[in-house]
Amino acid sequence: MKKTPNKVIFFCFIVLTLFISSGCQNLFIPTNVPVVLRNDPVTKDPSPQQVSIQSYTMASPGVVQDITNSGNNLILFTFGTTYNIDTYNTETMQLSSFVNSDKKALSALYDTFDTGIYYAEKLIDPITGSVGSQIIWSDVNQNTTRVISLPEENVIQHFGIGDSGQVVYANNNNQIVLADSEGNRQVYSVLNNYNILAVDYINQEKGVVFIATDPQNEERTNLYYANMKADSAELASTLIAENVSSFDINTLTNQVVFIKNTGDSQTIRTWNTSASATSGIATGNYDSARFTPNGERIVFTQSTPNSDSQVKSIWIMDANGKNSLQLTAPLNINSEIICHPYKSVLFFSVEKSSDSISSADEHTLSQTYQLTYKID
Amino acid sequence: MQLSYRVRMILYNILLFAFAFLIVVFCVFQGTSYYYINQTKDALQKTAQDSTLFISQELKNIQSPDSLKNRFIANSLYLSKSISENENHRVLLFDTDGNRIADSVEETTINNSLKAELDLSLAENAPVFTLKSINDASMAYFTAPVTIDNTVVGYLGFIYSMHEMDTFLRVAGILFGIGGLLGLIVLVFVTMSFSKHFFQPIKDLTKISNEINNGNYNLTIYYKHTDEIGDLTHAFNGMVTNINNVILQLESERKRLAGVLASIDDGLLAIDKNGNIITSNSYIKTYFNVSNPKTIYDFQYQSFLRDIFDSLKNGKDHISEEIDCNNRNLLLIGSPIREKGFEENYMIIIRNMTAARHIQEEQRKFISSVSHELRTPLTTIIGYTDMLTRRQVADPEILNRSLNTINREGHRLLRLVDNLLNVNKFDKAEFDFKKTNLNIVLLLSEVVEQMQIKASQTDVEINYVSEELPEILGDYDRLQQVFINIIHNAIKYSNRGDIIDVISAIEDNHIVVSIRDYGPGISEIEQKRIFNAFYRVEEDRSRGYDEGGSGLGLYIVKQIVEKHDGKIDIVSQVGEGTNIIVTLPILSVLIYGGDTDEKNTK
């Protein structure tokens, strides 16, 4: 009988000694012993494909906006003494000025046939000080410039391009306007008075996909789809997904890829008009995602969880979510990732840290890069 | 040093708490540090990958004819600083031979701090991670090859401070310490106060056990819960009740045995092998005048007891010894008490043979008297017949006289023999007394009436006076015989014209019958011998040949009276007459017992 408590005491003593002697050090991971790490732990499922960066070059200063269907030209926003919209020829690597304006450009896109550029400009009423925006179309040769939106309209800066040269945009009157450079306008009222934040056109279905604030919860934004009927000026929208932060539509496949927030992380999901439900592609900490022009892959940006910096790295994966490969190191990307229409080339802009940030102006140094990758 | 149960319980509790707490703390610490370290390892690997891409981007961006390797070397400082800014830890870059080419921290006191890791990385061409503890601070050392386009252009190394982990562990340690101390205090306090509550039933049990030790068996413990302690108290209560019952049983057995012993007519002494008295009965006190003897040696004046005891101890199976003690004739019978499984004890039975001896003596005297009495008439008869045959007497007068004498003596002999038979019957153990309830007044009335006839012959008058008397148990005929006999004697000894008073009354639970005559009376000497067998008062002998009292009358009377548990007394004075007093117990006394002392009265 005496032996059992003795054994117990002895055991306790051993544990105590162990504990104290370990001194809060881990007993299972040895100190001062180098350990070779064999596997690549970052990718959870080891990818059979490898990606190699063929080239990574600085293309031009400025923030890239869009690329032509040929892939020859880019739209860039540059800031100097004025707000400039420039175009950059990737072949000649020449930067040409397109628009110099005293109004800040918010976004710009080539029209369907690359004949002109639609761009949204910020308006500040000098008298009232109220902020608005308008959409302007200008042809590539800068011969014609036309204001597309109406003066009383306050255009939402994220707009889209239709399939026949028109622009689709939303205004602060809960209307979606389909307009072309000729001046033709079709105005649709969105039922339920959604507060629309971004809109784009689905060619095939003649409908629009837009992000609007959740009517029940102002903190949240949802993704909706509305079909433009020929006989109706009203748009009845259907909910695609809730809590969506960004989306992109592939013009070839008419697939919609969007990023949905789920708690601390995000999921990339896809949808098309014939699908009854959205499909989940991947989970992570995503910022933006879009299909490559051929619709076979998704290019997306990912940031490290819980990091306070704004750096993201660019990744590419198959449209089904497999084989995700890292293309860049974490960079301070401040533009969309623009894919070359047919080459494995990406264009994106990186914000450079500058010592002149102490000056209170909005001048930031932004550099657009061209990345050529090869997946084998 | 034996600690009390309660203290032991408290200590065990503390030990248990300490042990469990230590395990928890151990798990938390080890788990947390393990998690942190692994996290760091993964994070550094990711950083290495990002850095590699970054380096690749930067190097490819530079328009230079140099090889990547050379570009790497050329721009190493810039690269290391950029990466360090991005990642917030120290970044070192090495060339393909393992020489340090850039360090994001300019001043360094530790040179070649990543040497071991770098060598391993060089050798294995893989990342290497080491957990280091430098000045009690945890650091992570990490090296990895920088591979661009499938060629290793150099190596990078990270020195990452895991101070977060250290801080957390330190704070957690302090908190655990405080928590543990508080917990311990609370535990000790609670255990000490609750243990009282838990030990209360045990204390109660102990107290009651002590009470029972002191002889108080009427206690039970009350415990309201039905748990293990409740079972114990229940069992305990049952046990106490059982003990109580057994003790009561034993007590009643003992009393019964004592009763049995007390009712034994013999003295009983049971002794163990050491001479201690196991049990004795009251006769011991009566015979030897020793009360509550504890050992055989308490009988100081009865050495014979000790002798018997010694003989028994020496192995004698049976001893009988007759001794005289205190005017008593005692027969001592000693024998061992042997029972399987018990040690040998001894028993001595002390039988009072005084009465038996006395009776024997009486019988001896009786027989000698009888032979004497028988001889007397026989010699007369033989004398006369001898004379007649020898002398051939023809004288009819002498012949007549002789034959008459022979006849008379013959009759007397017959009477004697008849009386003897009666006496003999008395001496037999089974005397066929037919005892029934009888009314003494009725009996006496009949006797008086019957004897009045005889008394009238001598002008004697018998007066009978009595009150209402309760019944007695007795043999009607024999008692009649008694009173007939006594009154006959009274008539015999009364003078012509006298009266005889017969009075019967109740006195002290006894019926007292007194027969008083006013005759000559009996002297004191004769009073003493009058009840003896064959004793005849001289005058009687000289008088009444035709009567020829055998001298057995009063003897028989006495026997009958005594067989009725009564007694007979004479009060007489010469010249005053005689009063014979017969005392008989009434029915209830006989049944419910009187004295259980010796039957031999004085």
Image (tube, rainbow, N blue to C red):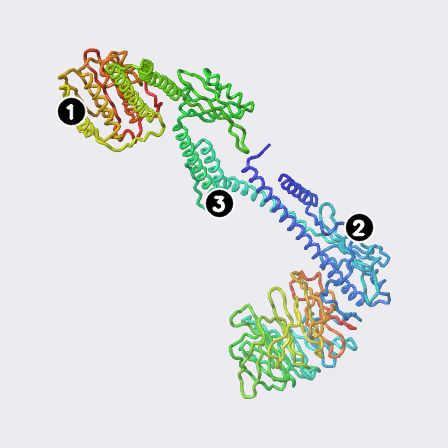
- Above or below B545: residue B144: below
Residue identified by numbered label 3: B231
- Mark 2 against mark 3, which lies toward the viewer? 3
Residue identified by numbered label 1: B453
Label 3: chain letter: B
Q: Residues within 10 Å of mark 1 (few under 14, many from 20)?
A: some
Residue identified by numbered label 2: B113
Disc on res. B149: none
Q: Which of the marked residues, 3 or 1, is nearer the chain's N terminus?
A: 3
Q: Residue B495 at what x, y percent from top left?
A: 16, 15
Rendered image quadrant of residue A94: bottom right
Quarter the N terminus of chain B occupies: top right
Residue found farthest to the bottom: A231
At numbered mark 1, what does the secondary structure look like: helix, strand or loop?
helix
Give the amino acid at mark 3.
Answer: Asp
At numbered mark 3, what does the secondary structure look like: helix, strand or loop?
helix
Give the amino acid at mark 1.
Answer: Ile
Quick one: B64 or B448, which is closer to the camera? B448
Q: Is residue B573 left or right of residue A316?
A: left
Q: Residue A9 at what x, y percent from top left?
A: 64, 41
| Residue under disc 2 on the same chain as residue under disc 3 | yes
Can I make out residue B164 in this image? no
Q: Which of the marked residues, 2 or 3, is nearer the chain's N terminus?
A: 2
Q: Is residue B255 left or right of residue A104?
A: left
Q: Residue B293 at what x, y percent from top left?
A: 45, 21
Q: Is residue A168 left or right of residue B525?
A: right
Can I make out residue B307 in this image? yes
Label 3, label 1: how far apart the Cα atoms are:
92 Å
Q: Residue A283 at what x, y percent from top left?
A: 65, 68
Q: Residues within 10 Å of mark 2 (few under 14, many from 20)?
A: few
- Above or below A315: residue B452: above
